[in-house]
Image (spheres, helix red, strand yellow):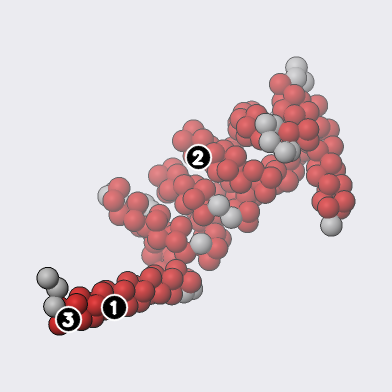
Amino acid sequence: MVTKKTGRLKSRAYRNFSGSAAESGREKTRRRNSPVPASRIEALIAELDSADPLIRSRARTSLVGAGKPALTRLSEVLAGASSRVRWEAAQALVEIREPGAAPALVAALEDDAQEVRWAVAEGLIDLGHDGLIPLLRQLVIRSGSIRLREGAHRILSALSRGDDGPVVRPVKEAIESSAPIVALPVAAHHALNELKNRERHSD
């Protein structure tokens, strides 16, 4: 049998626990919404080159948590660091999933390291429509790049099954053609115009 005193103690303990849990939730939200100093981002970028995989993983997770403020530095190291750092930066940009990362991801489709190219292609597939315009623009001017065409074919194959299918399928077919260097810029340019017309009509 529970006495009134015991009931009061349990009730007080529950209120204390609930209050602590709520405070913990507010603290997590506050930390997530707090701006990350540039010096902290720079330190985390440096840790991406650590020989310790645990340190690299923690640094990448923190950079993902930083979100948009980390995009510029991650994009920079993705373009010109060691292959290990480039892969870590690619993974972070993919996990952040910001449209602003799309140009850097598209450029990295021509990276020397296959694992980097694979990671950024996955990221562009995840971005979907938001990554299409930077990709199509690059295909217009870099149709001669075999690596770019290979990555774009994988991305467009995935996106052709979605809402943008009618726009991207002709570009995919141009990559598959016997003369992609000639056919691809035309198809990509046409797809860009199609997307712009869609956006105008939706406004």
Of the two numbered discs 1 and 3 in the rendering, the one whose residue sits closer to the viewer: 3
Expressed as whole percent of the image width and height from the top left, the position of residue 44 reads 39, 61
Q: Name the mark on residue 75.
A: none
> For the view shown, which residue lies furthest in the front direction?
1
Residue at horizontal 20 percent and vertical 81 percent from the top: 8
- Tell which of 96 and 78 is nearer to you: 96
Instruction: Write down the quadrant of residue 22 in the picture.
Output: bottom left
Of the two numbered discs 2 and 3 in the rendering, the one whose residue sits closer to the viewer: 3
Q: Verify CB contact (< 8 Å) between mark 2 and mark 1.
A: no
Of the two numbered discs 2 and 1 in the rendering, the one whose residue sits closer to the viewer: 1
Residue at horizontal 55 percent and vertical 52 percent from the top: 97
The residue wearing badge 3 is 4
Expressed as whole percent of the image width and height from the top left, the position of residue 144 reads 71, 30
Q: Verify CB contact (< 8 Å) between mark 1 and mark 3.
A: no
The residue wearing badge 1 is 15
Q: Amino acid at mark 3?
A: Lys
Expressed as whole percent of the image width and height from the top left, the position of residue 56 reads 34, 52
Q: Secondary structure at mark 1?
A: helix
Instruction: Write down the quadrant of residue 157 in the picture.
Output: top right
Q: Name the mark on residue 119.
A: 2
- The crowd level at tag 1 (other Cα within 10 Å; few <14, some 14-19, many 20+) is few
Disc 2 and disc 3: Cα gap in Å? 61 Å
Q: Amino acid at mark 2?
A: Ala
